[in-house]
Amino acid sequence: MPEAPKSEFWRDLKPITKVFQPNALPEIYTATIATDDERYYVPLTETVSSRPILISPTQNRWCDVLMAKGAGLVNRHYHPHQVFAYTISGKWGYLEHDWTATAGDFVYESPGEGHTLVSYESDEPMRVFFNVEGPLMWLDEDGNAVDYFDVHHYIAICKEHYEKVGIGADYIEKLFR
């Protein structure tokens, strides 16, 4: 039940009764996506972890909160599809660009971009909400593809981590849409 309205002009409106179309799945509501509970963050590298928020196996898409408590590095990678990022806290950027994102900053990554994601030392952990579509192609130092990481790899590492920390591997399936 949502919060009861007080003086809002719409307080007498009634909610619609036909909320979902046939076969539609319910929304996912997650409070405090940038939680301090580290069990929800799945290690991606030794310095960067990810909290899954939404996963679409059929669209090869996921939304997550990427976190690093200090200086961090995500392997060099290339995106064949678009990516959206919103900075919650901390500082991060790409070695290949001349900007540093801080709290409140938005980044749109065009399809076809390769880069090296780094987080900087900061008073707050780097926490960035990402909406990732399609695989990440891991790159060598010359920018050549050497491996890939997609939603199915992501699901596997999330299940393994959540089982290990006591949340349970099946938790991740609640995020499937």
Image (cartoon, rainbow, N blue to C red):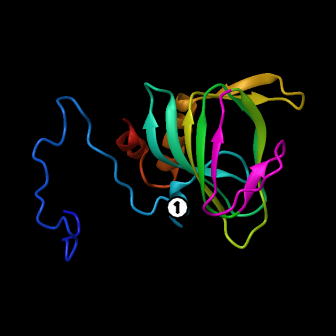
* Position in image of residue 74 (x %, y %): 74, 44
| Magenta stretch bounds | 91-111
Magenta span includes 68? no
Asked whether the viewer can see residue 114, the reply is yes
Q: Nearer the viewer, residue 161 or 119?
A: 119
* Position in image of residue 99 (x %, y %): 79, 52
**Identity of the amino acid at label 1?**
Ala
The residue depicted at 72 percent of the width and 61 percent of the height is 91
Identify the residue at the far bottom of this view.
7
Examine the image and state in which quarter residue 140 appears: top right
* Position in image of residue 122 (x %, y %): 75, 69
Q: Nearer the viewer, residue 54 or 102?
A: 102
- 125 over 93 or under it: above or below: below
Secondary structure of the magenta portion, mostly? loop
Query: Pointer 1: what residue?
Result: 34
Identify the residue at the far right of this view.
142
88 relative to 90 in the view: left or right: left
Q: Looking at the figure, which quarter contains the C terminus?
A: top left
